[in-house]
Image: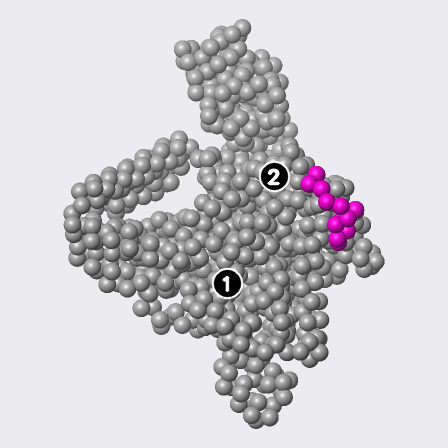
Amino acid sequence: MALQPTADLATADPGRGGRALGQRWLGWAALALSVVFIGYVAVQLADKGYTAAVIVAAFLALVVLALYGTRRAVPLKYLLPGLLLLLGLQVWPIVYTVATSLTNYGQGHLVTKEAATAQDIAYSVRQVPGSPTYQLSVAVKAGSPITTAPLAFLLVGQGGSLYVGDSSGLNPLAASDATVTSGRITAAQGYTLLNLKDANQRKDLSSFAVPTAGGGGIKASGFNTAYEGKAQLSYDRATDTVTDSSTGTVYVSKGARWVPKNGQGEALPVGWKENVGTRNFTDIFTNDTIRSGFLGIFVWNIAFATLSVLSTFVLGMLLALLLNNRTIRGRGVYRSLLILPYAVPAFVSALVWLSMFNQQFGVINQVTGLGVDWLGSPWAARAAILITNLWLGFPYMFIVCTGALQGLPSDVLEAARIDGAGAFRTLRSVQLPLLLVAVGPLLVASFAFNFNNFGLIFLMTKGGPFLTPDAQIGSTDLLITYAYRLAINGTAPNYGLASAVSVIILVIVGLMSFPGFMRSKALEEVS
Amino acid sequence: MSELRSAPAPVEARPARSAGRRKDKAVVRAPLREVWWRHLLAVLAVLFAVFPIVFVISAALNPAGTLLTTQLLPKGASVSNFDTLFHDPARPFVSWYKDSLIVSFAGATLVAFIGACAAYAFSRLRFRGRRVGLLALLLLQMFPVLLAFVGLYITFAKVGDVLPSVGLNTLAGLTLAYLGGAMGSNVWLLKGYFDTVPRELDEAAKVDGASHARVFFTITLPLVRPILVTVFMIAFVSLYGEFLIASIFLTDVGTQTLAVGLWGMTTGNNFNALYGEFAAGALLSAIPIIALYLAFQRQLIGGLVQGSVK
C-alpha cells in the first residue's frame, strides 16, 4: 500500500497528476488563509493599542510566508506549528508566572500607576453648581459582549451637539452616524446601546467616568443623564503627589497606592502594579503567618505523595505476587476486575468517593456505623484522601508489577530454588530487588505526579477542612491547591504571591526530575 | 490519569502476551485446597476495587434519587434519574458531554498531528540543532504548563480582550491552552516508532519525484498509524479528565466540560437531593473512557508493562 503512490507516479496517471495540482492549490489556500488570519489578529491588536504585539504578528506573518512560500528550510516547515504552540503556551506562561512572582499583581493592584491615578481622580469627580449636563445613552462597541466590554457614553449636550466618550476621552460624534429621538441618542453606528436591565448589571457604571480636558470627568447620574463634574483630586507630576482640593489632604505613593502624607485617613481605592523584587518569596519564608502555613502545607504535601506511592505500590505488588501463579483458575477475570478503577476517569472517582465519605448520608458511615466526620476533621480528611488515592492508584502499580514479575529472568529464580531458598527467601532476596530496579523510575514519576495531584484534593476537600472561617490554609492543602486559591478562588486574588508559590513548585519539581534527566539514556542515544 | 502519558509503544506487546496465553493452557490447574487463600485475598481485593462502581450504579438506578436512600446494592431500578439529568435546565449535562468530547477529540487530534509533524522532522530530516532540540523538548517536559496556571490564566484573560472567541470561557481557548505540550510530550515516543519505518521507502518515493510533503502524508503517516492511535488515545484520556485548567477557563455553566460541571453539582447545599442525578451523570461520564480501556486493554497493559521492564 505504501508503495502505491510511487508506482502511480511512474505510470503518470492523469487523475493522480490532477490531484497533485489540487493539493498544491490546497497548500497555497492554507497559506493565504493563515496570513489573512494573522492580519485579522493584527488589526484587532492595533485596535486595542498593543503595538508590540502587532509587530510580533507582522513578523510572524513574514516568517510563515517565507517558510511555506518557498522551498527552503524544510525541517522548520514541520516544526513551526509545534514550536509556536510550545513557545506561546508552555514557555511563555512559565516565564510570565516567574515575572508575575516578582510583582504585587492582584486585586487592587491590576493596572499601571498612571492608569490607577487617573482612575482615582475620575472616581473623585463631584457635581458642582453650574456644571454642564448631558442626555446619556450607555453603549458598548458593536459586536462586543454587553456584560464585559468597555463602556462608552453617547451624549447629547445642552446645545444639541453629539459626543461619544470612553475611558480615553471625549470626541464629537457626526450627526449623520446617530439617530436622536426626543433629545437622546437611540442608535449610533458602531455601537450597541444597553437597555436599563443590561445597564443595571454593569456594576462599573457608577464609577465609570469619561475624562475631560482640565482634570474633570463626565459621570452618569442615573441611567439617562450625565454631568461633567470637577475632580476633587489632582496629580502633581513634579512632586509625585495627589492633592484633594476639598480637604487639602496630600497623598504620597507608598506600597503601590496613594496614602495620606500625614498618616491620617484612608488610602485611595485603586493601587497599581509594581515590581516588588523578591518580596513575595521573603514573605513566604519570613512572614510568621505565611511561613508556618507554608511549612505545614509542605510537610503534608511530601507526606501525601510519599504515602500515596508507598500504599499503592505495596498493595499493587502484593496483588501482583498473589496472582503471579499460573496454576490459579480465573486469573484473567481477577486481573480485569482489579484494573477497573484505573479505567474510571479520576474526576468521577474522586467525586464518587466524596459522596461515599459524606458524614450524614454516606455509605461508608452507613455500613461501618462509625459516624466519623470524614471530610470535616483534619486527620479523617487526610485518611479519606489517602484511601481514595489508594483505590485510584493501586491498579496502575498492579499492572506494572505484574509486567515486571513476568519479565524477571527465570534462570535466576531457578538458581535460587536449587540453592535451597524457600518461597519467602526467594521473594525477599531475588524477586523484590529485581522488581524495584525495574519499577523504580515509575515510582519516582508517580511521586512527582502525586506531588501536584490537584484534581483529587480539590475535588474532595478543596484543601479543607478549614479550622477557622477566615483561615487561608486548609488541612489537606497541597502547594498547588494553595496557589490556586490565592490566584483564582479567593475573594481577593493575589497573583503575585500565587505565582511565587508556583515558582517554588516548579523549582521542587525540577530538582526532583533533573537527576532522572541526567541519567536518561536519551542523552547518549539520539541517533 | 497523567501517568498514562509515560505509556510507550504497545507494538511488540501482543505476540509476547499471546505466547504467554498458550503456555497458560498447557498448565495443570492447582487443586483448590492449596490455593484457596489466594482466591480469598483476590476476592477481597476485587470487592475493594468494584464496590464504589457498584455503589454509583446503584445510586443511578435508585428511584428515590437521594444520597441518603442509596444502598450498596440497588433495591429497585428506574431510569428516572437519567430522565431528570437530561431535562435539567440548570445543569445542561448533554452540553457538558458534547463539550468534553469536542475538546478531547479536537485536542487529541491536534496533539497527534503536531507530534507526528515534529517526529517526522526529527526522525527523517537532518538539520542543525536537531539533537539539542530533542533534548530541550525532553527537559521542558519536566515543567508542565499546569504549574504555570497563573500565567496561563492572565494571558488568556488578555487574549480574550482582543479575540473574544479564544478567550476564557470558550472551548477554543481551552483547547488551545492544552496544546502547549503538543509537540514535546509525545515526540520521543513518536520518533522512536518513526525510526522503525525503513527509510528506503522515502528514498524510493523521492527518486520517483515525490515531494517531502507527499512522502509525509502518503507514505509515512499511513505506516505509523498504530502509534498515532496510541498517542491520540493517551491524549484523549488525559484531556477528558483534565480539571484544573478547565475549571479556571470555563466559569459559565453553559460552556463547561463534564469534570467541571459534575463538580459543580457536588458543591451546592442540595447534594443529597441531587445525588441520583449526579450518579447517573457520573456513570455516563465514565463510559467513553471505560469503553476505550476495554477495547484497547491488551495494548494498554502491554505498553505499561514494556515501560516498566525497559
Q: Name the residue under label 2.
A: B93
Amino acid identity at mark 1 = Arg
Q: Position of residue B294 (x, y in %)?
A: 54, 57
Residue A223, image x and y in percent? 60, 17
Q: Which residue is nearer to you in this view: A247 or B5?
A: B5
- Residue carrying label 1: B298
Which residue corresponds to the image point at 20% horizontal and 59% vertical from the top-left?
A: B204
Q: Which mark is nearer the camera, 1 or 2?
A: 1
Asked if labels 2 and 1 touch by Cβ distance under 8 angstroms, the answer is no
Magenta-drawn segment: B69-80
Query: Few, some or many C-alpha atoms within 10 Å of disc 1 (few <14, some 14-19, many ≥20)?
Result: some
Residue A22, located in which quarter of the rendered image? Answer: top left
| Marks 1 and 2 belong to one chain | yes
Q: x%, y% of residue B276? A: 71, 43
> CA gap, disc 1 to disc 2?
32 Å
The residue sitting at the bottom extreme is: A419
Image quarter where the C terminus of chain A lies is: bottom left
Q: Is mark 2 on a helix, strand or loop?
A: helix
A168 in magenta: no
Indicate the amino acid at tag 2: Phe
- Give the camera-side residue of B148 and A128: B148
In the structure shown, which secondary structural element does the residue marked by tag 1 occupy? helix
Compared across the picture, whether B211 is left or right of B38 comes to left
Q: Residue at x 29, y 44 (%)?
A: A64
